[in-house]
Image (spheres, rainbow, N blue to C red):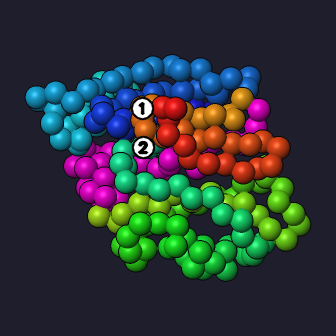
């Protein structure tokens, strides 16, 4: 399996990785980096620079990680519901956990099947961001001619398993880390510097 990964760093730099998944290992095939510099002040310029320097895998997804400074990651325990009812329930449960007006935000989430709360509950980890920031990112990607398949925040996607008890992604989220208790299934976002 092959992947194209565009990483939007907290420092404004852009990394592009071509990855191959072989024999249960991820093998980096190519990496290109464009820092913030005078000729690349706009994010779209930096994205355009890395896309010019690399030939992306065709017929492989392009995944974007990071690039959103005002994201919030929330983990909730919810009843086992169908997808539509679960989305409605999350839209009801999320607002008290967030700063600002929920109507002005966009969000996505995923169930955490590796956390077994009990038979009638499911753990959900959600990422919420201001709609204006999301639209700004989409605008920058469009200006760079970048079409992508997925956007994700690493705290939402990280698996709950041994080796991932403490997750720190300095390129994406420099100030915080995800701390997960694999026995209880609870997780917290903590300051990255103790």
Q: Which residues are magenta?
A: 133-162
Q: Is residue 103 magenta?
A: no
Instruction: Give the residue at x 53% y 20%.
Output: 28
Residue highlighted by disc 2: 66
| Numbered disc 2: secondary structure | strand
Instruction: Give the residue at x 53% y 55%.
Output: 73
Instruction: Give the residue at x 57% y 59%.
Output: 74
* Disc ID at residue 147: none
- When asked about the image quadrant of residue 31, the answer is top left
Left or right for 137, reference 96: left
Residue highlighted by disc 1: 171
Residue 33 appears in the picture as rendered:
yes
Q: Is residue 165 above or below residue 99?
A: above
**Which comes sooner in the sequence, label 2 or label 1?**
2
Whether pointer 2 and pointer 1 mark residues with C-beta atoms closer than 8 Å, the reply is yes
- Residue 141 in percent (x, y) is at 30, 48
Could you say which is closer to the camera, residue 119 or residue 165? 165
């Amino acid at each position: 399996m092959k992947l194209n990964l565009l990483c939007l760093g907290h420092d404004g730099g852009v990394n592009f990785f071509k990855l191959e998944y072989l024999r249960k290992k991820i093998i980096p095939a190519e990496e290109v980096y464009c820092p913030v510099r005078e000729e690349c002040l706009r994010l779209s310029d930096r994205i355009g620079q890395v896309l010019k320097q690399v030939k992306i895998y065709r017929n492989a997804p392009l995944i974007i990680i990071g690039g959103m400074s005002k994201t919030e990651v929330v983990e909730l325990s919810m009843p086992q519901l169908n997808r539509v009812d679960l989305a409605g329930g999350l839209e009801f449960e999320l607002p008290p956990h967030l700063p600002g007006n929920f109507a002005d935000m966009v969000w996505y989430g995923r169930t955490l099947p590796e956390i077994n709360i009990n038979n009638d509950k499911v753990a959900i980890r959600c990422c919420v961001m201001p709609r204006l920031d999301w639209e700004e990112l989409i605008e920058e990607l469009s200006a760079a001619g970048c079409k992508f398949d997925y956007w994700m925040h690493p705290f939402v996607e990280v698996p709950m398993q041994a080796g991932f008890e403490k997750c720190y992604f300095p390129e994406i989220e420099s100030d915080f880390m995800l701390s997960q208790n694999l026995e209880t299934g609870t997780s917290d976002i903590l300051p990255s510097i103790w």
